[in-house]
Image: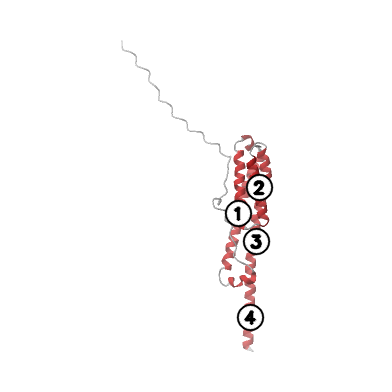
Amino acid sequence: MVIGLIVLAALVGLVGFGIVGFNKLRTLDVASLEALGGIDVQLTRRADLIPNLVNTVKGYAQHEKGVFEEVTKARAGVQAAAQGGSVDEKAAAQARLDKAIIDVLAVAEAYPDLKATVNFQQLQTALTDTENQLAFARQFYNDAVSQQNTAVRTIPWLLFTGIAGVHAREFYNAPEGQEVAPAVSFDQAPEAPPTPPAAPPTEPPASPTV
């Protein structure tokens, strides 16, 4: 009788521990998915700013057709990646859009009247704000993935990965050369070239002696 109770208690303990392990891994996985969704929200928000940016700059530089076509394609790539792409695909799409946006802003650099418009300044501010939010979302996702990956690779939680269907996830790493999004700032005027030193004064010729 005593042995039976011990065995029963052990079975109950194992089942309870299994439930705890299952729930822990599933909770970590859900947190990672939610964090990844936060990245998708910011990628989509950034892509939504592109049509207005293109139309604003195009009004001043219609001849830059290639630049506008590339940023439109990059925007479409971000939207597709945000809907169901892998983490690497999202990062690559973001890097392409970053470069395309900078190319558009570089075109705008040649038009002081454009840079002075309220609409353009608001767009620039919105793009900067979205990039900051995206950086925060990336870090939040990587923190969640770090916790999940640590759990699924350490005892005792790795014993429940098969049952829970939870495995290690890939980090959101920007492609090489795109760890930090390039930035264009119109806040500072270009420095004036240095003024050449003045030529030394020439002395008048000496008067002839009489």
The residue where tag 2 is placed is 73
Kindly give the residue lying farthest to the top in the view shown.
Answer: 210
Between label 1 and label 2, give the one nearer the viewer. Answer: 2
Residue 129, placed above or below residue 110:
below
Q: Is residue 210 above or below residue 80?
A: above
Marks 1 and 4 sit apart, C-alpha to C-alpha, by 46 Å
User: Which quadrant of the view contains residue 38?
Assistant: bottom right
Mark 3, residues whose alpha carbon is within 10 Å: few (<14), some, or many (≥20)? some
Q: What residue type is labelled 4?
A: Leu
Q: How far apart are marks 3 and 2 (CA)?
A: 27 Å
Query: Extreme left residue here?
Result: 210
Whichever of labels 3 and 2 marks the residue nearer the N terminus, that label is 3
Q: Which of marks 4 and 3 is in front?
A: 3
Q: Which mark is residue 11?
A: 4
State the CA–CA distance, disc 1 to disc 2.
15 Å
**Disc 1, SS:** helix
- Find residue 21 and report its image quarter: bottom right
Tell me the kind of residue under disc 2. Lys
Q: In which quarter of the image is residue 152?
A: bottom right
Q: Mark 3 points at which residue?
A: 33
Q: Which residue is drawn at 63% across and 61% down?
A: 32
- Whole-percent x and y of residue 150? 56, 66
Q: Which residue is labeled 1 in the image?
A: 91
Name the front one of labels 3 and 2.
2
